[in-house]
């Protein structure tokens, strides 16, 4: 629970919110009213609340209740029934927007090695290196992959195709533009400092004016974005991806639903494709036969299909 709370605080920080109370749960204790609210959201708004931890949902709902000045779950569900704009705002608040360029640099050291390995193999077979950044939020993770592919001399960027998916259309709209304004609480230049070993070359791919960062055409053209619900939708591909990156989503998901989500990912990977998940996440024991641990500390696995 402490890991999840810390992650929620990171969401508020990276989105530029300075309100600590937005991450606090409601003080209401009526479990029936809360269940009725979740049932409405699942049935009428088509959001799979049953897959998520109640504590996470309560924090997101309570944030919207404070902003709409509703005091009880019953009042808030009445508001939802009559206000389509609030329905959209609630669904957007459920989107998990933990993101950043090159989050956890030590993990990206390992991702670089995976890309070099896949690139070398693709060069021998004249194939494409296909990467899926699942639950990619506003696109900074897939763009990090693209930047690395273009800057590292051991990776053939021309052979790399990156798919970024998320459930949030507003986040995907931001991603497609490739323009990021630096909030007061986030240092984007520090995030991009992972690329400093390539001297100043990365600046040709990132236009920086005051607190606005714009990704260059070459970086954006390597990435396509689509809406995808990892919980409810079919795999984006079958046995086609060399690497799937899905970090800091499973920490919010109830254990019983992690298995089908990871099965969806496994079906999308090549027979020896790689999976990278969040450092606070693990593969359920029932699925460990499908993945071989490559780096336990950095949560890197390789598909082990029979």
Image (tube, rainbow, N blue to C red):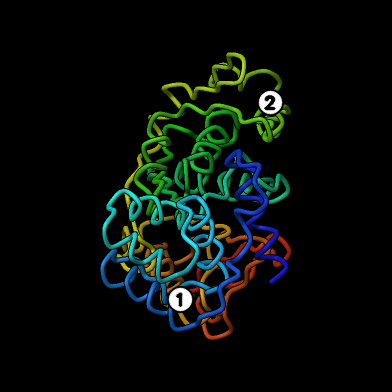
Judged from the image, the secondary structure of the residue bearing numbered disc 1 is: helix
Q: Which residue is mark 1?
A: 34
Q: Which quadrant of the figure has residue 270?
A: bottom left
Disc 2 crowd rating (10 Å Cα; few below 14, some 14-19, many 20+) is: few
**Place of residue 198 in the rendered image (x, y in percent of width and height, measured from the top left):** 68, 25
Disc 1 crowd rating (10 Å Cα; few below 14, some 14-19, many 20+) is: many
> What residue is shown at x 62% (from left), y 62% (from top)?
300
| For residue 45, side relative to residue 36 (left or right) | left
| For residue 255, side relative to residue 2 (left or right) | left
Of the two numbered discs 2 and 1 in the rendering, the one whose residue sits closer to the viewer: 1
Callout 2–callout 1 Cβ contact below 8 Å: no
Judged from the image, the secondary structure of the residue bearing numbered disc 2 is: helix
Please determine whether, in this image, residue 141 is positioned above or below residue 211: below
What number is the disc on residue 46? none
> What residue is shown at x 69% (from left), y 31% (from top)?
187
Q: Which residue is mark 2?
A: 198
> What residue is shown at x 50% (from left), y 77% (from top)?
290
Quadrant in which the N terminus appears: bottom right
In the orientation shown, which residue stands out farthest toward the top? 209
Q: Nearest the camera: 140 or 37?
A: 37
**Place of residue 82 in the rendered image (x, y in percent of width and height, measured from the top left):** 26, 58
Quadrant in which the C terminus appears: bottom left
**Place of residue 103 in the rendered image (x, y in percent of width and height, measured from the top left):** 65, 45
Q: Between marks 2 and 1, how big is the CA–CA gap?
A: 52 Å
Please determine whether, in this image, residue 283 is positioned above or below residue 114: below
| For residue 118, side relative to residue 104 (left or right) | left
Q: In the rendered structure, which disc, 2 or 1, sits on the residue that comes first in sequence?
A: 1
């Amino acid at each position: 629970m402490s890991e999840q709370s810390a992650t929620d605080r990171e969401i508020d920080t990276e989105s530029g919110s300075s309100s600590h109370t937005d991450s606090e749960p409601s003080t209401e204790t009526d479990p029936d009213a809360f269940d009725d609210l979740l049932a409405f959201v699942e049935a009428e708004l088509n959001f799979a609340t049953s897959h998520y931890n109640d504590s996470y949902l309560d924090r997101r709902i309570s944030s919207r209740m404070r902003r709409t000045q509703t005091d009880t779950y019953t009042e808030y569900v009445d508001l939802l029934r009559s206000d389509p704009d609030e329905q959209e705002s609630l669904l957007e608040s459920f989107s998990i927007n933990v993101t950043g360029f090159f989050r956890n640099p030590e993990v990206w050291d390992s991702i670089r090695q995976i890309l070099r390995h896949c690139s070398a193999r693709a060069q021998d077979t004249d194939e494409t290196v296909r990467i899926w950044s699942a639950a990619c939020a506003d696109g900074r993770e897939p763009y990090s992959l693209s930047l690395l592919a273009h800057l590292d001399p051991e990776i053939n960027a021309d052979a790399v195709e990156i798919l970024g998916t998320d459930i949030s259309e507003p986040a995907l709209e931001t991603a497609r533009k490739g323009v990021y304004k630096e909030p007061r609480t986030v240092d984007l230049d520090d995030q991009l400092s992972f690329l400093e070993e390539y001297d100043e070359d990365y600046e040709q791919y990132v236009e920086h004016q005051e607190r606005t960062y714009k990704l260059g055409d070459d970086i954006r053209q390597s990435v396509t974005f689509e809406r995808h619900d990892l919980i409810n939708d079919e795999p984006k591909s079958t046995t086609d991806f060399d690497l799937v990156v899905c970090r800091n989503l499973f920490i919010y998901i109830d254990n019983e639903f992690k298995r089908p989500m990871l099965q969806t990912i496994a079906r999308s990977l090549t027979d020896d494709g790689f999976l990278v998940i969040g450092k606070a996440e693990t593969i359920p024991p029932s699925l460990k036969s499908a993945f071989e641990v490559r780096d336990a500390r950095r949560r890197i696995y390789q598909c082990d299909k029979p």
